[in-house]
């Protein structure tokens, strides 16, 4: 019996209270976006697999690789994608938005760490600058829920709790191309954690 009580306590400590206000701001499912990126005179096509996302880790067929290699040739390239942290947030607020990577979650997820080639900024696709020949590669860690809304840590119904897997997001600063002539830093929201959330059932 002691083992059963300990398991329930451990699992509850890994759950997070569902916060509807925090996730509502990141719900872009009803917004329509254009499906191409303009760099100079050339339109960089968005791969079909990415058109329903806010980012793309698939390199487009007409990605201006030579342009970016020449743009950064011989220049200092110390900048890398930056995970944004709001100084006004306390630790609990930060974990509520991003999820705690050290916590135990019972959610199926996919984690990748690879270059990102396109991102949406204010509803428009932007081309992310990658110049591997000049040792400049912008990689980001993406953690996506395999099944958003599925149940997790089953068995808490008797306690009046309903659990679901929720997608959490965090802001990143990434450098993109502007008309193929200059670099600009933009802040984008990317999937960061698949977290088991709970809410009380009346």
Image (tube, rainbow, N blue to C red):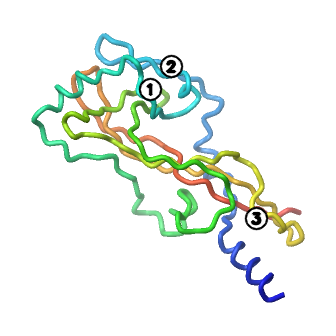
**Residue at image mark 1:** 125
Q: Position of residue 123 (x, y in %)?
A: 49, 28
Given residues 180 and 48, the one toward you in this image is: 48
> Which residue corresponds to the image point at 70% horizontal and 46% vertical from the top-left?
147
Whether residue 26 is situated above or below residue 83 in the rendered picture: above
> Which residue corresponds to the image point at 47% horizontal and 21% vertical from the top-left?
46
Any mark on residue 35, and which? 2
Dot 3: what SS? loop
- Mark 1 or mark 3, earlier in chain: 1
Confirm or deny contact between disc 2 and disc 1 (CB under 8 A): yes
Would residue 196 appear left or right of 78 to someone viewing this image? right
Q: Position of residue 71 (x, y in %)?
A: 18, 27
Whether residue 147 is situated above or below residue 29 in the rendered picture: below
Given residues 41 and 58, the one toward you in this image is: 58
Dot 1: what SS? strand
Would residue 185 appear left or right of 93 to someone viewing this image? left
**Residue at image mark 3:** 153
Distance between mark 1 and mark 3 Cα atoms: 38 Å
Residue 6: quadrant of the picture: bottom right
């Amino acid at each position: 019996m002691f083992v059963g009580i300990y398991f329930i306590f451990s699992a509850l400590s890994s759950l997070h209270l569902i916060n509807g206000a925090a996730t509502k701001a990141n719900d872009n499912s009803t917004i329509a976006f254009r499906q191409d990126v303009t760099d100079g005179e050339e339109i960089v096509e968005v791969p079909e697999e990415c058109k329903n996302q806010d980012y793309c880790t698939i390199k487009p067929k007409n990605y201006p690789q030579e342009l970016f290699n020449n743009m950064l040739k011989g220049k200092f390239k110390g900048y890398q994608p930056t995970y944004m942290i709001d100084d006004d947030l306390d630790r609990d607020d930060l974990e509520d938005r991003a999820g705690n990577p050290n916590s135990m979650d019972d959610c199926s997820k996919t984690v990748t760490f690879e270059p990102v080639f396109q991102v949406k900024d204010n509803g428009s696709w932007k081309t992310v600058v990658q110049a591997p020949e000049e040792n400049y590669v912008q990689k980001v860690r993406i953690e996506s829920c395999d099944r958003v809304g599925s149940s997790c840590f089953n068995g808490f119904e008797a306690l009046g709790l309903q659990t679901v897997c929720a997608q959490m997001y965090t802001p990143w600063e990434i450098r993109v191309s502007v008309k193929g002539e200059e670099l600009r830093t933009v802040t984008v929201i990317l999937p960061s954690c698949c977290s088991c959330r709970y809410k009380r059932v009346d």
